[in-house]
Amino acid sequence: MLSVRDQWEQRLDWLLSAVLWASLTVSIIVSTMLDGATANVGISALLAGGWVVTMQTVPRRQRNSEQWGELLAVIGVVVSLVAMALTGGADSVYVIFLAGAPLFAASFLSPRIAYETGALSIAGLFVVARALDQPLLDQSTFRSAFLYALIVIAFTQVRRILVEAQERSDELRAASARVERIQSAHTLLTSLSELANTQELNPVTIGTVALRDLSTSVPFAAGRVSLIREDGDQVVVATSGDVPEDAAPERYPIEMRGHSLGLMELWPEPEGELRSHLPAIQPIVRQLGLAFDNVAIVQRIAHRTVYEERVRLARELHDNIGPGLASLGLRLDMLIYQATDDPDLVRHLEGTREAVTALVEEVRTTVTDLRHDNVASIVEQAYEVAAAAAGAGPDINISINEHRPPRPAVAVEIRAILTEAVRNAVEHAGATRLEIEGDVDRDRGRITIADNGRGFDPSELPKGHYGVMGMRERAAEIGGTLTIDSSGTSGSRVTIAWEAD
């Protein structure tokens, strides 16, 4: 598709061709009619026709260049003046043809060349008249000179206006492209800002939003966003489209303050390219780096704050409540020893003593759990499991209402069950959508993993597949139950429920 400048230059080229051929035809016919088929008429026609043919055969871009254009314009003036000198000088019909060279220079070349060509034509006109002893102050000579000057000035200004209009159009187009990139970046930032106020602020959702918003301004066949963990492993957190098997992606490192946080890979569409869209891609990559870094900072701050609060609570329990309960137990022991003559009171005190003992053990267990530094909430663990499975392409929606995270021993088993259930849904059931939902409150909870994949009969598991058995064993380890509902038409539902006695 031709640009706007190429379009109007093409139209001017058609106008120039029409003027040259028309003036050449008129000059040959009229000079033949006035002077007959003489040698001078033939030479004039041959020279003028040769220049017109040359103008038509030289490639337009080469002909309109400064060096070639100036040479052709000068040759056109010389040829026209020679033809005029051979066919009557200032009274020759080739006076009309002489206007072709200034018209060409004014329409396609720089103002300097246009004015030089016009001046050369006017000076040549007077030189030919002088050489043929024709009056220099003749009215027709001045009319011709005025015509050449008018052509040069008018078409030079027309060209200047067209060039300036094209430059403004290019500036507006560039500004429009910048506005589109700013709007795209604003859309992404708005989406991330909205996510920041929800529990979905995580690498999986951020990567998905980035690819979704990028697709509105950059055409690509497939995209993938990976996150580099602290241990150096690269984990795919979001994908978009079907990755072509025989095509290499364009890779864009996600960095922040010199640290590598991840990688965005884009596969161009067939016969397409992404290099021209780099100004739109780079801001998204920078925003991804900022978002990933912010998530990491928020998580570190949250973990540190939670850990410090846990340590404070553990210290309060250990230093104040623990000794108080121990002292209460000793007093109960003394009362039991002194009340041997009242069996009913002894049984009541012994029951209370057992409750205090259980409470002391509970406090000790709680202190140990609170001082554990690597306890992640079930919501965080669910997102980590989803991020690890995102490379396989399923759409995973997480909706877990977690009031308080479970104890570390319970959290480890829940994560293992989540991981196995998600892996089975993706690898064996071929699920494209998973729903992870539930409620968690410290010692009790219920989590359901539902998929839309191929169902199976939980009572008839293939030999050598121990995933379901392992999940049941882990559920029993924390005193919970594992329920599996599955059919061939509606996928599977795996529910883990636990509640401390």
Image: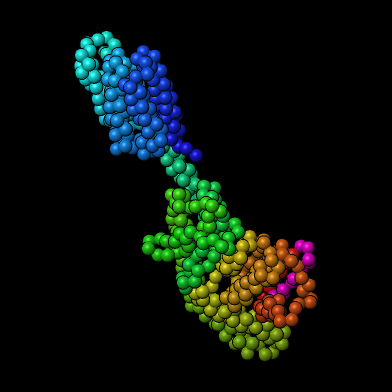
Q: Is residue 385 above or below residue 44?
A: below
Q: Position of residue 227 (x, y in %)?
A: 50, 65
Quarter holding residue 361? bottom right
Camera-side residue of 275 and 320: 275
Camera-side residue of 103 and 77: 77
How many callouts does the rendering have?
A: 0
At x 67%, y 61%, the residue is 433
Colour scheme: rainbow
Q: Is residue 52 above or below residue 403?
A: above
Any part of residue 285 in sight: yes
Does 356 sit left or right of 83 as displayed? right
Query: Residue furthest toward the top?
Result: 139
Quarter holding residue 380? bottom right
Q: Is residue 384 above or below residue 144?
A: below
Does 55 sit left or right of 389 as displayed? left
Quarter holding residue 436? bottom right
Camera-side residue of 282 and 476: 282
